[in-house]
Image (spheres, rainbow, N blue to C red):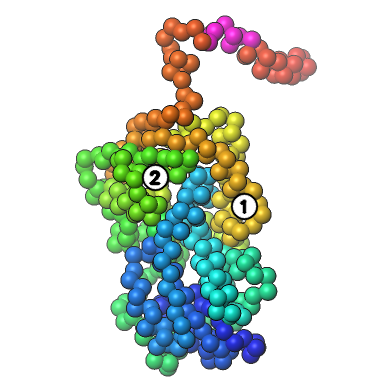
Amino acid sequence: MADKKVKKVVLAYSGGLDTSVILKWLIETYGCEVIAFSADLGQEEELDHLNEKAKKTGASKVYIEDLRETFIKDYVFPMFRANAIYEGQYLLGTSIARPLIAKQQMEIAKIEKADAVSHGATGKGNDQVRFELGYLAMNPHIKIIAPWREWDLNSRTALMAFAKKHGIDVPQTPDKPYSTDRNMLHISYEGGILEDPWESATDDMYTMSVPPEDAPDKPEIIEITFKQGDPVAIDGKTLSPATLFRELNRLGGRNGIGRIDLVENRFVGMKSRGVYETPGGTILRHAHMGIESVTMDREVMHIRDSLIPRYAEIIYNGFWFSPEMKMLQGMIDHTQQNVSGDVRLKLYKGNCYMLGRRSEESIYSEDFATFEDEDVYSQKDGEGFIRLNALRLRIQRLMEK
């Protein structure tokens, strides 16, 4: 039974079929005022039309927020300082966007004195968890309405019928046989024909990148400059976070970089097949690891690396605003104090090759690493080092005898 006490709801609204139906359904079911909120995270769609569309469907007010710079600077870059990757492949493009949407939605709810928030995530996926953990971290008392867990509109046919009945404009173009989610970091494809993990993704599915075999035959050489773990310039040109990332996407996309096809483990318990394009993120992670290799202490790096799976899992599962994430991010940011310098990369037909790295903070020493004559390292010291490290192995063997 719907809670009739709800007076005002802020809805995360994209203008698609689901959230358009949800907007009208909220008004009908709860008899409440609905405020629509859309976030521009670089999904490369014109959002201006959403104001008119949402109001036509019944919204009393519409917020369209440009969050592109905030998204890259305060969410994507901190995550890439950690070289975060989930289950060895996924660069967390959808996962990292949800906490920002939830935070901004809650800020609007506070401004508007709304007593509830709503989203269009289904009851089977990760996004419901990510959104709602974000909401509750901001306001422990907020009322959350998740229509997919309440209504009986459990099929696309039912949604289309509801939309037609209420005069909601629905695109008449044939639907692609899968669902997508896009922002500046990536685009994902799930469902439909991809639910069979043996079925190949078709070439016409991809949006951000060309097929590697169709990429230019001539390699492209680029340089990325880092300052304390964040990229600040490409080929010597200083750029804002979002502008820089847009350029990395362009460079990666035209060279066929960043495509992956994986079966991942959702937080709610099931496996899910997804196809992703993350061109700029793939280049950035490769470059960041390159500059770290000459600037970061070995033991610091190894401890940080041991925590990457946990850090990525925290983001994937929706705990961006948790105490453990705050602790880990503080530690990771501390490791980045000297991660500054330049990386030179070759982009070629789906691959990203490291060509060089340099830094004024470098702790790599040619004097120490050289195979030529030198006087900073006595090779005789190696014998004692080996015998001390072999001591427990020798004792174990002696005891066995």
Query: Residue placed at 61% from the left, 36% from the top?
Result: 303
Quadrant location of the N terminus in the rendered image = bottom right
| Residue 369, image x, y percentages | 46, 17
Q: CA distance from mark 2 to mark 1?
A: 24 Å
| Residue 301, image x, y percentages | 56, 34
Name the residue tied to disc 1.
325
Note whether 57 is above or below 330 in the view shown: below
Residue 284 visible? The answer is yes
Query: Residue placed at 43% from the left, 6% from the top?
Result: 373
Question: In the displayed image of the protein, which residue is found farthest to the bottom?
Answer: 165
| Residue 115, image x, y percentages | 61, 80
Which of disc 1 and disc 2 is earlier in sequence?
2
Note whether 292 is above or below 154 in the view shown: above
- The answer to whether marks 2 and 1 mark residues whose Cβ atoms lie closer than 8 Å is no
Label 2: which secondary element: strand
The local crowd at label 1, few if under 14, some if 14 to 19, many if 20 or more residues have their Cα within 10 Å, is some
Residues drawn in magenta: 377-384
| Residue 132, image x, y percentages | 60, 69
Instruction: Place residue 39 in its image quadrant.
Output: bottom left
Label 1: which secondary element: helix
Note whether 84 is above or below 190 in the view shown: above
Name the residue tied to disc 2.
232
Q: Does residue 127 appear left or right of residue 187 in this picture?
A: right
Instruction: Place residue 124 in its image quadrant.
Output: bottom right
Residue 118 visible? The answer is no
Question: In the displayed image of the protein, which residue is found farthest to the front?
Answer: 111
